[in-house]
């Protein structure tokens, strides 16, 4: 049997490596599948006051979906479940595949074993090898749901705990791994900005991610076994805050993905101001013509994030609403050079996606309108 797996691994290695040589396809995020973990006869983990994971995950999933539809009505939002029903693990990924989803988000809650009863914080996973005992414990707990399925032997033609299978999983998902880890990193960053403890981005062999044919992540939103975190996750305010953080990560990921999809000819006419050089002479000329250099720090659906509230109260930033998205924009800088230096400081403060924007008479203008090549 091990020899059989080795041949498969070698075959997939060649397949994945050869696939890397093809030119990258431009992408647009049109469909997202949101998976509320557990449900029905599978309650998931239980909290200190007997709260149920399945209820928390459903609340966060539905809230996230509503936020996405409110801001991006053209994005197709699909749920693996919208009520308290049991959905088999292999069917969750199939739902995403059948809808040709561009992104799969599986939402869960964590539970600590007795020896680590005070553990708390979020973790976001991409499919891969479990590189620590903690990852292995979480993977086994989530994959144990398989045993609740009728005829589960026929639904899974592999041993979820097999080391060889994890290697195959990692190879099959390799072409999506970079994007999955990218999105996972954005999620954990948003949790930190929302003043939540992050335990980092990790990899493990979750069955629910195994057959997904698109970038996919599994979010452990927090530990129900930690009484303080349980109270937060079971509250409407806490669930909304978690959904808002995931939504902010979704916005950043979507914008980044679709920026890459701009044809090269358009990119050449409208370059990112953070990646080009503007001389002091050009900067002075633009300022004289009434152009203003600012920095966009974030795009959000609401302003409940305490970090953003502090910035707004201090009158360091202003709120600009464009296409129903609230954008957090800094005040004007007196030159491009000053804006670019400040941008680096904002990035160090945690706003990793900060970039320079230009306004004139209160209206945002594209860089192509700056006539940068005339001098």
Image: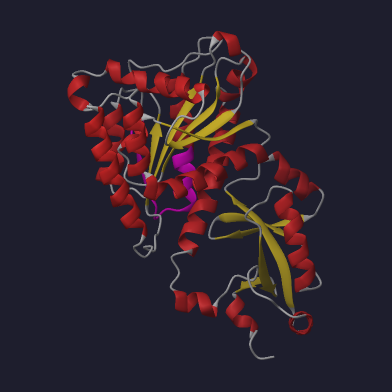
Numbered circles on residues, count: 0
Q: Is residue 316 above or below residue 136?
A: below
User: Is any atom of residue 109 visible in this view?
Assistant: yes
**Which range is magenta?**
64-82
* Residue 283 percent coordinates (x, y): 76, 79
User: Does the magenta run of residues contain 135?
Assistant: no
Q: Is residue 60 above or below residue 134?
A: below
Q: Residue at x 39, y 64 (%)?
A: 26
Quadrant that contains the N terminus: top left
Q: Is residue 136 above or below residue 103?
A: above
Judge by depth and name the residue closer to the eye, 181 or 129: 129
Quadrant that contains the C terminus: bottom right
* Residue 292 percent coordinates (x, y): 73, 73
Judge by depth and name the residue closer to the eye, 127 or 51: 127
Q: Residue at x 47, y 47 (%)?
A: 68
* Residue 244 percent coordinates (x, y): 56, 40
Q: Residue at x 40, y 16 (%)?
A: 43
User: Does the magenta run of residues contain 81?
Assistant: yes
Q: Quadrant of residue 366?
A: bottom right
Q: Is residue 268 above or below residue 133?
A: below
* Residue 335 percent coordinates (x, y): 79, 73
User: Is any atom of residue 81 visible in this view?
Assistant: no
Q: Residue furthest front?
A: 3
Q: Residue at x 65, y 30 (%)?
A: 197
């Amino acid at each position: 049997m091990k020899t059989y797996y080795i041949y498969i691994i070698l075959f997939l290695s060649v397949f994945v490596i050869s696939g890397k040589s093809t030119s990258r396809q431009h992408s647009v995020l049109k469909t997202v599948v949101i998976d509320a973990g557990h449900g029905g006869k599978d309650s998931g983990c239980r909290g200190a006051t007997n709260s149920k994971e399945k209820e928390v995950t459903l609340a966060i999933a539905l809230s996230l979906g509503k936020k996405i539809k409110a801001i991006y009505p053209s994005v197709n939002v699909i749920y693996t479940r919208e009520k308290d029903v049991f959905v088999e693990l292999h069917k969750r990924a199939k739902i995403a595949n059948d809808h040709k989803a561009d992104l799969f988000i599986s939402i869960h809650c964590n539970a600590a074993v007795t020896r680590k009863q005070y553990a708390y914080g979020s973790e976001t996973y991409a499919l891969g090898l479990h590189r620590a005992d903690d990852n292995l414990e979480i993977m086994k707990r989530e994959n144990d749901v398989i045993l609740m399925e009728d005829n589960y032997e026929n639904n899974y033609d592999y041993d979820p705990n097999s080391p060889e299978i994890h290697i195959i999983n990692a190879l099959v998902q390799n072409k999506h791994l970079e994007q999955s880890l990218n999105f996972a990193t954005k999620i954990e960053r948003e949790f930190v900005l929302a003043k939540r403890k992050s335990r980092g981005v990790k990899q493990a062999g979750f069955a629910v991610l195994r057959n997904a044919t698109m970038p996919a992540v599994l979010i452990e939103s927090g530990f129900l076994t930690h009484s303080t975190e349980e109270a937060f996750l079971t509250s409407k305010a806490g669930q909304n805050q978690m959904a808002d953080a995931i939504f902010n990560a979704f916005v950043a990921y979507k914008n980044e993905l679709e920026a890459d999809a701009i044809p090269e000819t358009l990119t050449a006419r409208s370059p990112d101001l953070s990646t080009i050089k503007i001389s002091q002479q050009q900067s002075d000329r633009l300022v004289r013509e009434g152009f203003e250099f600012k920095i966009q720090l974030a795009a959000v659906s609401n302003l409940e994030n305490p970090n953003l509230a502090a910035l707004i109260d201090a009158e360091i930033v202003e709120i600009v609403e464009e296409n129903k998205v609230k954008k957090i924009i800094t005040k004007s800088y007196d030159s491009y050079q000053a804006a670019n230096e400040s941008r680096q400081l904002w990035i160090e403060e945690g706003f990793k996606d900060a970039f320079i924007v230009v306004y004139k008479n209160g209206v945002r203008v594209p860089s192509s309108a700056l006539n940068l090549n005339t001098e």
